[in-house]
Image: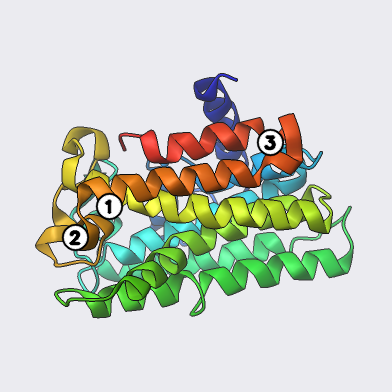
Amino acid sequence: MDLKDYLHNRSALVDQALDRWLPGKSVLPFSLHQSMRYSVFAGGKRLRPILMIAASEAVGGTAQQVMHAACAVEMIHTYSLVHDDLPAMDDDDFRRGRPTNHKAFGEATAILAGDALLTEAFRLLADADANLLISPATALRVIELVARYSGSQGMVGGQIVDMESEGKEIDFPTLEYIHTHKTGGLILASVQVGALLGGGDEEQFAALSRFAGAAGLAFQIADDILDVVGDQSELGKDVGSDQARGKATYPALLGLTEARQRADELCNIAVEALKPLGAAAEPLQVLARYIIDRNH
């Protein structure tokens, strides 16, 4: 499988759908919609929607079956980055090689753009066209999963523990809590929703959940490592910012060598979890390795 072609093809599908479903720049209120689109189309990897598509395909589904949900998850991810960059949190000036949203549009607009993206995501999940071919029970389960892993028991919960841990010595369970919730939660939701909307059975859902749990944690460890050894021009943001803020990371707690070993172990666990799915899960296998070998 050619990973580059796969990523390009699937991300193009997601971008087309996002462009179609997000309010245009010429729709009132202009500044808010410009701000929302500025961050959504800032050059993200679309990893979460692509994982959702790949999970759907692994159980016999298609990209189209998950597209509304895939775009919703990308909107939620984008809102989290917009808010994460704010002065009250990480106070970052650059994201993906260009000024962060609050630098380009002001803090108030950035906050509201994030709020609007989160709300728009759930409007999309509840859209009648999105749920035309699935049962009401499945539609509700999808919305519940995305809400659970986005909120206080998921991404937002991980973010606040991350903030509260800055500059402190923390233990390994706290570090793992931060990573599995702040980053891993939305990745787990993406894969589980892909399995549900693709028509997977309970056994397939369980296998994909094991994959996503390991892959999500590996992704954040890889991010931690890149913050230490990455190239700023490829990352599109400052290198070393985690250490400067005293953030809880795997390299800080375990050292670079052990952090890399842990990422490799998790990648192997993720790939092993996919065995019951056979050849249909090949894109997910390749994506697991990409997660820890990427340079940005």
How far apart in space, not on screen, are marks 2 and 1 (Cα)? 9 Å
Quadrant in which residue 248 is drawn? bottom left
The residue drawn where x is 18% and y is 41% is 229
| Secondary structure beneath label 2 | helix
Q: Which residue is mark 3?
A: 281
Q: Residue furthest left?
A: 244
Whichever of labels 3 and 2 marks the residue nearer the N terminus, that label is 2
Q: Are marks 2 and 1 in contact (CB under 8 Å)?
A: yes
The answer to whether residue 28 shows anywhere in this view is no
How would you rate the neighbour count of disc 1 (Cα within 10 Å): few for under 14, some for 14-19, many for 20 or more? many
Q: Is residue 141 left or right of residue 292?
A: right
Labels 2 and 1: the sequence-earlier one: 1
Q: Amino acid at mark 2?
A: Ala
Question: Residue 96's x, y, as percent?
Answer: 29, 43
Question: For mark 2, what is the residue?
Answer: 252
Residue in the picture at 75% in, 61% down = 127
CA separation, marks 3 and 1? Answer: 27 Å
- Along the polypeptide, which appears first: circle 3 or circle 1? 1
SS at badge 1: helix
The reply, left or right, for residue 7 in relation to residue 109 is right
Amino acid residing under circle 3: Ala
Q: Nearer the viewer, residue 25 or 175?
A: 175
**How many residues crowd mark 3 within 10 Å: few (<14), some (14–19), many (20+)?**
many
Nearest the viewer among 232 and 204 is 204
Residue drawn at point x = 21 percent, y = 48 percent: 256
The quadrant in which the C terminus is found is top left
- Position of 53 compared to 73: left or right? right
Identify the residue position indicated by label 1 in the image.
224
Residue 160 percent location from the top left of the image: 34, 78
> Which image quadrant for residue 131?
bottom right
